[in-house]
Image (cartoon, helix red, strand yellow):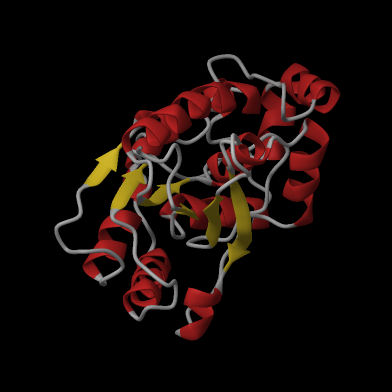
Amino acid sequence: MTPRWPERLWIVRHGESAGNVARDLAYQQGLARIDLTGRDVDVPLSGLGQQQARALGHWFAEGREDGRPNVVLSSPYLRAQETARLFRDAGGCPADTRIHLDERLREKEFGILDGLTGKGIRAEYPQQAELRASLGKFYHRPPGGESWCDVIFRLRTLMDTVGLHHGGCRVMIVAHQVVVLCLRYIIEGLTEEEILAIDREKDVANCSITEYRWCAGAEGSDGEMQLVRYNVTAPMEAEDTPVTREPDPIVGTRG
């Protein structure tokens, strides 16, 4: 009988992106808008982000994880694809491992607020800033964008696909900060208050590892995925590669 869930599941946030760098600069300079052109989907990794992805690959290649993934799923956004490819090229998984792109792993969509800093949102869309403050990030959906709940809806179907097609496998997912958090919400059956408390505690680091292992239940029980560790940055620290975390702005930008 094929197991219902992966034997191991690693969830990784992409490496630092050019968007992360531009966002931090915009906040430092008190700007209303982040200095980026083109689509968010096409934002690449920064040079440091490439180093982080390679460090992650080296960590797995050296056997630090008691096994390597044999299935890799990635957000279609360029920064996630590049992270997955550099990870594979550095030996993090077998060289012939296919990187499966899945649009359900894409970044949270910010609609009319995309590219704005907190200052810009308050200036251009004060009503949205008020709504977000009232509803909270879990339920606030900007026009043309998504709430955390919307992200969770699509990720629930993704996890059904993972269980159906990759049961018993060693699976790695490469995606975005909100996706990492929302997957924790789904897998662990957390409440809104619990996942937002985790979010407030510390931002998800670029190329950090969140790991789950399958734990068989008692006879007649389906068993469950159990969290082993969260937001681990040891691969970067082992190579003296700087660890980066993008703080969560008032309503969110590129992550």
Give the quarter of the figure containing the N terminus.
top left
Q: Residue at x 43, y 35 (%)?
A: 105
- State how many labels appear: 0
Would you say 250 lies left or right of 59 here?
A: right
Is 26 above or below relative to 152? below
Residue placed farthest to the top in the image? 143
Would you say 130 lies left or right of 114 here?
A: right
Would you say 144 lies left or right of 45 here?
A: right
Residues 11 and 206: in front is 11
Residue placed farthest to the left in the image? 96
Residue 238: percent from the left, percent from the top? 49, 84
Q: Residue at x 53, y 62 (%)?
A: 208
Residue 136: percent from the left, percent from the top? 79, 28
Is 114 above or below relative to 19? above
Residues 117 and 244: in front is 244
Residue 154: percent from the left, percent from the top? 49, 24
Q: Residue at x 56, y 57 (%)?
A: 210
Q: Quadrant of residue 189?
A: top right
